[in-house]
Structures are given as C-alpha cells and as structure tokens.
Amino acid sequence: MKFSWKIGGEAGFGIMTIGLSFSKIATRLGYQIYDYNEYPSLIRGGHNTYEVVVSDQKISAGRWAIDCLVCLNKATFDLDKHRLTPASLVVYDPEEFEPEGNYQKIPVPFKKFKKEWQVQQLMVNTIALGASLALLGGELQFFYDLINQQFGKKGQEVINFNEKLAKVGFDYVQKAFPNQIKPLLIKREASQKLVMVGNDAFSLGAAIADCRFYAAYPMTPSSTVLTTLASWQSQTGMVVRHSEDELAAVNTALGTAFTGVRSAVGTSGGGFALMTEALSFAGIAEIPLVVYLAQRPGPATGMPTWTEQGDLLFAVFAGHGEFPKIILAPGDVEETVILTTKAFDLADIYQTPVIVITDKSLAESHLSLEKSAVQTFISKYKPDYGKIIKRADSLPYLRYQLTPDGISPQLIPGQKGVFYQANSYEHLEDGHTTEDAAARVAQVKKRSQKTVTYLKNHFHAPAVYGDMAQAKAVFVSWGGNKGVIVEAQKILSDQGLATAFIHFTHLFPMDVSQVSALFNSSRRYVLIENNSQAQFGQLLRMQTGIDIKEKILKYDGRPFWPEEIAQYLISQK
Amino acid sequence: MIDSLSFDAYTPTWCPGCGDWSIRIGIKTALTQLGYDPSKVFITFDIGCSGNMNDFLSGYAMHTLHGRAVPSAIGMKIGNHNVKTIVIGGDGGIYGEGGNHFLHACRGNHDVTVIVHDNMVYGLTTGQVAPTAKKGYKSKSTPLGIIEVPLNPLALAVSQGATFVAQAFAGDLNNVIDTVKKGLQHRGFSLINLLQPCVTFNKINTYQYYLKHVYKLPGEYDKSNLKEAMNKALEVNEEKFPLGVLYQAEKPTFHEQLPQLVGNMPLVDRTRYTAFDPLINEFI
C-alpha cells in the first residue's frame, strides 16, 4: 500500500505546519512516511506545497502520481493537474474554481467556513486537514492530540477552537461524500516512529556526539540546525551561537575546539565559501572541526529554497594549501544521525576538518524512522576522542610531534607548566613558526600521513543495494539520491528489471582498492547526480581512474523522482 | 619562581626601536605582576608584526588567521571561561580585516582583553596605509594620499558597548604596564589601543610626534561618563591622544549571561549530556 497526499496554497498560508501535522498523524496511525515541500524564498505570496507519501512499508522517496490533492487555491490544481489520475481525489473550494477534467471531485466550501467561523486563512488549514482525514479514513482523535501538543501553552480555549475547526472539515466530508472515502489511513499496529528531516538528524547526531559548541549564521537550507540546537541548549548545555557572519562562526568554533570542546558550524554554499580560509587554518593547526554543509543551487545566491548537489567539488577543494580533510555524505535521515556522530569522532581522531554534506531535499524532507533503532544507537554510541589528552605524559610536550600515523597527541590546554601554540604558520614539532626546509617537509608528510591512516582505519566502502551479479544495470550515486534510487529499483523490479545500486557515503578521500573491486568493465554503470557537471563522477575518476560514461543528471532545483529514473532505464532497454 | 622571563620564548625579530618591544615587555610584566604564568593564559595572535609575538610570548595560544584573532579568542573564552584571554593584533587585523568582529565583540561584552598595536601603517607587508592613518597619508598603496577618514577605534568601542576602553603609548613603558594591568583586571570586553611608532615605514607618526600629541588623562577624569569618553575619543580629530582609561563600566559579560556557563565549571570539563529521550520525543 502506498499513496500520496499533497496540499498547496499561497506562501504564508501555513502549509509547512499543516503538512508536518499530516506526516505525524500518518505515522501515529501506524504508517511510514516520506515528505517533500517546495516554497519560494519569501515570506508572503508565491506558492507553497507539501506532499506526503504514506505506506505500510518502508518508504524513502516521493511518488509522481498524486492520490489526494488539497487545493487551497487554484494554482495548486493548475500546477499539479498533470500528476493526477481519474482515481485522484481533488479537494477544492467551488467558490474559488471548478477543476476541469475527470477526477474524484470533493468540493469543500472553505471560504464559507472561513466567514462563518470568522477565522484567518491560517486556520483554514485545520479545516482542510480535518477534511483530508475524513476522506482517507483516519481518526480525528490523532489530530486532536497534535492540536493539544501544539497549542497546549495557549490555553484550553484555543485548543477547543482548533479542535472544532478540525471537526468542521471532518464532519462535512463524512456527511457529503460517504461514497468517496478511501480507507487508507485505518489505524494499524506498528512500532513507534520518529518524523525527522536531515537537519534534525544532524542536530541530534551532534548532541549525541557530545558537541558542546555550534556556531552559524542563518542560511537556507541549513538554518533549522541552528534553531533546533538553540531550542535544546538549556537541556543539552550546548552553547549555540548565532555569529555576526560565517567568518566569526568558524573562527569562534576553532577557538572552542582549541580548548578541547567538540565544535561544529553549519551553513550552505555561500556561507561555506566564507569559511574556507578557516578550514585551511584547521588543517595546518590540526584543530578538530565538523562542518555541516547543506547544499542549495548556486552559483552565488542561486535558488535558495531548492535542491542541488553542486558544491561537492568545491567542498573537496575548499581551503588553500594541502591538508587532510574528510567528506561524508549521508543518504537519508538515519544515516545522517550515524555519520554525524562519526564525523565528530573522525574530527577528533584526525584533528582536522570533517564535512558532512547534504542537500535541501535531504535537509528539509521528513522521513519516518524507528524510535527504538535511534534509542539503541544512542545507548551504544561512545565518543572516540582519539589522541586528545588531558595530561602530557612526557615533557617537553610537543604539539606537532612526528608520529608514524601522522597524529600527535593534542593536549587540552590547562596542564600546569605546559603551554603551546596552535599555529597557522608552518611550524616545528613544538609549535613555533619555521621556514626551515626539512621541518616543512616533515610536517607536510606528517599531515598527509593522516589520510593514509584514515583510509586504513576508517574509510567505508560504499554499500551495494541489489545483486550485482544479476543486475542489468548498476546505479552509482551519493548522498540524498539514495531514497529515490532505492524506490526506483522497486519499480524496476516489479517490471522484471533487476538492478543494483552503489551508494557512496565516504566520498573523500577514497580507498582505490576497496572501490575498484565494485567496478568491472563488463557491467553497465549509470551515474545519477543532482548537478550538471557530474561532480561525483569527476571525483571518482580523479581518485580511482574509474570513468562512468552513462549519466542521468538533473539540475533544475528539484530532486529526482523514482519514476523518472525507472523510466530512463525502461526506455533505454 | 614566576618572573616575567617565564613568558619569554624566541628573541624578537622586530626592527630596532620598534614600539612592539616595549609593548611585549609591558604585557609580560603586567601578566607577571598579576600572578599569571604561561599555563594560565589564553592568547590569540593576529597576523602582522604584532602577531609575530606568537614566538616571543608564551601561553596556550593560537596564531590565528589575519583578522580573526577576536572570534577565536571568543571561542577560547566560551570553551574555558576560567582562563584569562588576551588578543594581540594590529590596526589592520583588528580594525580592518576583522573590523566586523571587533564591533560585534564590543556589543557582546566578551571577557577578553584586546591589545591593538596601532601604528597607522602595515609593517609586515612593507608600508601600506592602515585604517587608522590620517586622511591624506601617503603610502605605497595610496601614493596620492588615503581618501578615507581614519577609523576611530576608541569612539567605535565606546559606542558599541565595550566596557573598558583605554589608550597607551609604547614610548612610555610604565603607562603600557599600568594600562595593560587595568585591562586584564577588567571583567568584560577591554580594548587597549596602543600607539606604536613604526620606525621603518611611518615617518610621520614617530616617537617625537607622539611626545608632542599625547597627554595623560588627569586624576579627576570620570571614566564612568560615557559622553565624556566619547568626547575624549573624538580628540584624535584634533591630533590629541589621551592616555589612560577613557571609559569603564561594570556589566555582565557574555559568558556570564549564558545559563550553560554559570558557575566555575567550564564547558570543556562538564560531563557529557545523555538524556536524549525528551529530545527525540519531539519528533513523534
């Protein structure tokens, strides 16, 4: 079972809030969800949409066909009618427009209700969600529970009023369209789920990993990490700082990291550009730092509220000079929690910057995940601080001591009788500035050795979904495309087309032998990326010599549809 | 025994006669007299002749990027607020490249002492104009004379919420020691603008120039009066340079206003937070 519900209206109508309510009600009713929203870079006017795919199975991407479309304005219908089928339910206000075509039409007099109850447009959402629940066979009580949670602080009167509005929509549909009701949201027994976006997952991962300082300057689509961590700070004790700019954010984080505090910054492409000089500083001074980079389409201001994977090569090459850097790209919300905690460990172990790269479609789309799985992960996780020490055993303490693995013990400042500097200049083992040729070479080699150690100890080969031996084609991709490709594989498998999918998460640096083992000249590989330059393809070729010729690239600001990828393979068969 | 030699590292490489020599002696003397040793201080060094003190003055230190010594120091203070935190930089790094950080640090009343070597010229890059240079100052990068009026660090600090604003002259070591000590003893954001002759590249703002244009604030001067401090700060427009503390106020510092940092337990030493159920329940 799988169906999709979509609501659309003018920006400022409260579409985001009501969409998330639908996702939470569906998971509380025992289903799994994936949701996706589109909104323009402004606060009022423009068009907002929110769509939720619901299933009784694990689901990880959107669905092209819309099974229930709730139109709070005519634009919603006009922009999405090509995704409707004759079986689609279309909820609309007959006072606003009449949808032309063959659909299951559900006219609901929103404007009339709005006048009758003297409510703002924002509250029409509540009526619309009530109507949706009736139409899909859901229970109103689950909506009431959410209303109580949401408005608990505003008092019983507000709660009662919102409950009444929900009931208005619900009752109207039950009475007027009893034959159109589809029993899709019937309560079923299922384990408890969490509904999280990628930004939530990074925030939670950071808190789990003992991150105690986070600094940022707001930038879509990374901003909710800042606001979420800030809302938790009185519980977690994390210091969350909204700095004057990204330069301050990252250099302040290097200051806290110097004192031994796990620290992170978050931003999108433009802010990341401002941070790159400091990445280079972290590289030579060997200061642990985690950077959360949520991509959006550039260049420059680009399309702020849309998605793209266009900053990968920029991230790989960010920072002047040569220094070790690790780039991790989670594929979904669950992987974001896990890889974020790993990023903090790796930053400490290798005393260098680690970038967690996502994109808008992962950062701001909700996915349901097992609460118990998250709890189990939390209870098992133990931070690995590497060679960060509270006491130097042998004196004199050498901050940049030459070691076989390239990693020197990093003393948390405070030990009496000891001191050292974290130096942005090239330095001797004791931290003092040097321009000596031999000392320079020794320190460059030491820093480079950390990459060798990482590839040996912490690099993870990509996961493979499907059977490579049986596959007619092997998809190759990274990051947030994972969910879409896994869903595409299901569609193709239903049509008798076996495929495999190589999903990269540890993008840079890459171990040649582990990756090469997955590539064989007799197989058909198809690279899938949300950018125009096949940046991961270039990175793979640069690091391993593997060159994938066949590519599906999308760079219109929208994520892939599973159907789009499936159709490509079917038409190319 | 702790004496000022404890802070010594390499022999400085500054030009003979450079004002930085006495500033360094002033800083290490002030620190020693106040009972600090290199294990008890955080220092960030900016880039430039002033920042090169990184190898001549010991401490738990960061030799930061150019312009970023202030934000890095703010981070150090947040990470361990029990440690005295000092920023050492020049007019280019603190007022030019890092100007935005400087004014926001004043606003935040971060508990750091910022010591700025103000020589009105860029020494390490061989003599280009600095933001504090007088309008019309001719340099390699402004052969026709600088068009902009000089940045006024004292007025900027006073107006943006700094709670300690002082000026000292490198040609008067006792004045340097005394002012740095007062700055270090202050709780909150303290700025010490240090007039420092660059003997190699600035032939106008020399020791002789300053001896003519500086004067000590009188004993009866009321440093708690913000408007009076502003008046004093603006005297630079008449080429008068008051020495001493222009402004001082008692206000809660940035870290004192963070409930997470209340008390003596620094962020770095706290136990790890592990009660995650209330957080994840928000996502149900």
Image (cartoon, coloured by chain):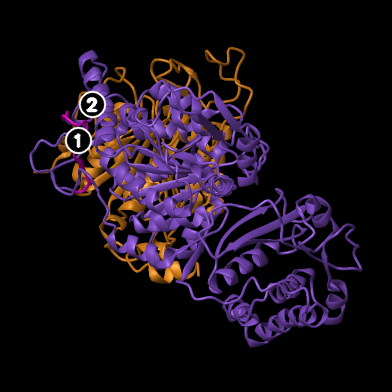
Chain colours: A purple, B orange
Reply above or below: A81 against A436: below
Compared across the picture, whether A162 is left or right of A514 comes to right
**Which of the numbered marks, if any, corresponds to residue A408?**
1
Residue A367 at x, y percent in the picture: 53, 58
Residue A33 colored magenta? no
Relative height, residue A93 to residue A483 (above, below): below
Q: Residue at x 19, y 45 (%)?
A: B39
Above or below for A404 versus A82? above
Which chain is mark 1 on?
A
Q: Residue at x 50, y 18 (%)?
A: B128
The stretch in magenta equals: A402-414
Quarter holding residue A156: bottom right
> On the image, numbered disc 2 is attached to which residue?
A446
Q: Residue at x 18, y 39 (%)?
A: A409
Q: Main secondary structure of the magenta part?
A: loop
Q: Secondary structure at mark 1?
A: loop
